[in-house]
Amino acid sequence: MNFIFVLFFLFSSDLFSKEKNVYEIISRNADLSIFKNYLDKTGLDDVLKKKIPYDWTIYAPSNKAFKNIPNELEEQILSDSYFTKRLFTDHILAKEVVGSKLTDQITTELTVSNKPVELYKSESLFIKDVVIIKEDLLASNGVIHIIDCIMFIQPSFQDDRLSTVQRDSFPITSCCMQTSDEVSLWKLNTKK
């Protein structure tokens, strides 16, 4: 009887989550159900299920992230499968970046949408000013980090929160998409 319990525990445990691909881990996480639905609608689910020569890093917005978005994001971007797919390719790297291996030194990586993002660690893992709330969910084909916002990657000259020195030093910045102006800027920078 104890032997059966041990087998059940081992095979039902997340200790072996590395056997699942990134899409399966997202699918099984109740806090990522809205993100999963958008992956399904855009066809990104099929891409993330595959084992390819490189691994994925996914910055997965939690359900809470979708509750805090501007109405314009829902109306103008998330209602259109082309824009939705482009938005969520901003959240995916074609390289595995494990948070436990990052330091306070900023490293720049490219998203699948070919936008640079700056990553660093200072107590928590950060993508510029996007805080990772749960990091290093390891999968057979990459890693997932959960964030509580939708990322907005933009040319720095459009970010009025930055000083001239910051704009010159960092051509691209990322933050949480929180305003209708940011939605409009993202859409303007994303041609159909």
Image: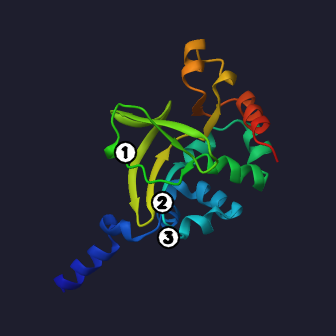
Residue, disc 1: 99
Vertical side of 50 occupied by 122: above or below:
above
Position in image of residue 10 (x %, y %): 27, 74
Nearer the camera: disc 1 or disc 3: 3
Nearer the camera: disc 3 or disc 2: 3
Q: Which mark is residue 132?
A: none
Three-letter amino acid code of the residue under disc 3: Lys
Vertical side of 23 occupied by 187: above or below:
above
Vertical side of 14 occupied by 125: above or below:
above
Position in image of residue 103 (x %, y %): 33, 36
Residue ranking furthest to the right: 192
Position in image of residue 19 (x %, y %): 38, 71
Q: Secondary structure at mark 1?
A: helix
Q: Residue at x 32, y 45 (%)?
A: 101
Q: Which picture quadrant has residue 15?
A: bottom left
**Residue 43 makes an appearance in the image:** yes
Q: Residue at x 39, y 47 (%)?
A: 135
Q: Disc 3 and disc 2: Cα gap in Å? A: 20 Å
Q: Nearer the viewer, residue 150 or 162?
A: 162
Three-letter amino acid code of the residue under disc 2: Asn
Residues tagged 3 and 2 counted as in contact (Cβ below 8 A):
no
Residue count near mark 2 (Cα–Cα under 10 Å), binned few <14, some 14–19, many ≥20: few
Residue, disc 2: 29
**Residue 177 makes an appearance in the image:** no
Going from the N terminus, do you reach mark 1 or mark 2 first? 2
Residue count near mark 1 (Cα–Cα under 10 Å), binned few <14, some 14–19, many ≥20: many
Residue, disc 3: 51
